[in-house]
Image (cartoon, rainbow, N blue to C red):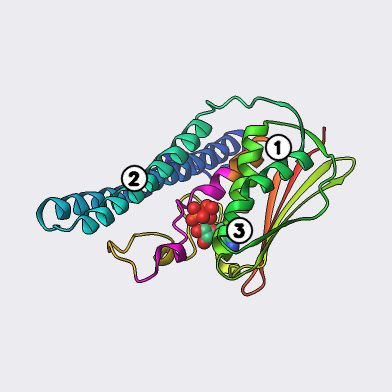
Amino acid sequence: DLRRRLHLQRRDEFGELAATFDHMLARLEAAFKRQTQFTADASHELRTPLTIIDLKINQALTQLEQPEEYRQAFEQIQAENAHMAAIINSLLLLARADTGQIALNLQEVDLGDLALACVERLLPLARASQIVLTTGDLPEVLIRGDSHYLGQMLTNLIENGIKYSRHIGKRVHVEVACEPPLWSVVRVQDDGPGVTDEHLPYLFSRFYRVDKARSSRQKGSTRSTLPDQEKPGGTGLGLSIVQWIVQAHHGEIRVESKIGTGSRFEIRLPLL
Ligand code: ADP
């Protein structure tokens, strides 16, 4: 093939050029493979709720007789619809991000204020999930960023903390710090179930979920053995979006997690 014909062993300038070209080709191939996999995963994830919706409609048309049965069927249809809408919204955002179509609305943002606003908005969800949502220091820390997307970043992390710890009566804790001269720091930490080391490198990958059977309807079964409130039905895209937002703000994200102890997400964004 092309790469073999380029005589990569040559040690002159042409050899160097060929090696660079080879490297670029490998990266393009990898990117292409990732994109193909992404499309396949997205189709699969969307097909599952569609199949369930179709099944439920058929059932309603041919088998159900009692109003209560109809109500339940339509509630399930509604839930699958909402799940599909969540996947599509996240996919659209990532697709626009991939193609550079999102222009951040950069302004001075106080991370302490923003974190407080997010926490206050999520308090009812935490309460309903029997999670204690607490804040540590939330000083004024100014950065240049897009408050809409930074809010989404915080919301996704806090919601995950609540979602994966819920009904255990545990705590999700949010704090902001300033590490001059360079960094602002945001930490979202929970004492939920945690994640084993082998999963950590993939948490930010699109459609990656640690516990697929519990967090999705992938088994093709329309009836789960778990009651609805125990199924954290996510899209597997939340952390990919968080990662994009962090990168778009020239920041870094790190996660530490331990089974039985909990998870801690730490984000560093450049100070104003
Ligand atoms: P999802 O929509 O499934 O929550 P995310 O991209 O937000 O997708 O997260 C990917 C996976 O990482 C989740 O399915 C879950 O397995 C794991 N995860 C994320 N946050 C936490 C957390 N706070 N505690 C335990 N596991 C988590």
Task: Please state which amino acid type lies under the numbered disc 3.
Answer: Arg
Is 70 placed above or below 226 here?
above
Q: Kindly report the distance in space between the C-alpha atoms of the residues bearing marks 2 and 3.
A: 26 Å
Comparing labels 3 and 1, the label whose residue is closer to the camera: 3
* Residue furthest front as drawn: 67
How crowded pointer 1 is (Cα within 10 Å; few <14, some 14-19, many 20+) is rated as: few
Pick the residue in front: 224 or 6: 224
Task: Please state which amino acid type lies under the numbered disc 1.
Answer: His
Q: Secondary structure at mark 1?
A: loop
Residue where numbered disc 1 is placed: 250
- Span highlighted in magenta in the image: 225-241
**Residue positioned 45% across, 63% down in the render:** 229
The answer to whether marks 3 and 1 mark residues whose Cβ atoms lie closer than 8 Å is: no
**Residue positioned 56% across, 65% down in the render:** 166
How crowded pointer 3 is (Cα within 10 Å; few <14, some 14-19, many 20+) is rated as: some
How crowded pointer 2 is (Cα within 10 Å; few <14, some 14-19, many 20+) is rated as: some
User: Sequence-wise, which precedes: disc 2 or disc 1?
Assistant: 2
Does the image show residue 130? yes
Q: Kindly report the distance in space between the C-alpha atoms of the residues bearing marks 3 and 1.
A: 34 Å
Ligand 1 - quadrant of the structure image: bottom right
* The CB of the residue at mark 1 lies under 8 Å from ligand 1: no
* The CB of the residue at mark 2 lies under 8 Å from ligand 1: no
User: Sequence-wise, which precedes: disc 3 or disc 1?
Assistant: 3
Quadrant containing the C terminus in the rendered view: top right
User: Sequence-wise, which precedes: disc 2 or disc 3?
Assistant: 2
**Residue positioned 33% across, 50% down in the render:** 80
Residue where numbered disc 3 is placed: 127
**Marking on residue 81:** 2
Whole-percent x and y of residue 197?
60, 68
Quadrant containing the N terminus in the rendered view: top left
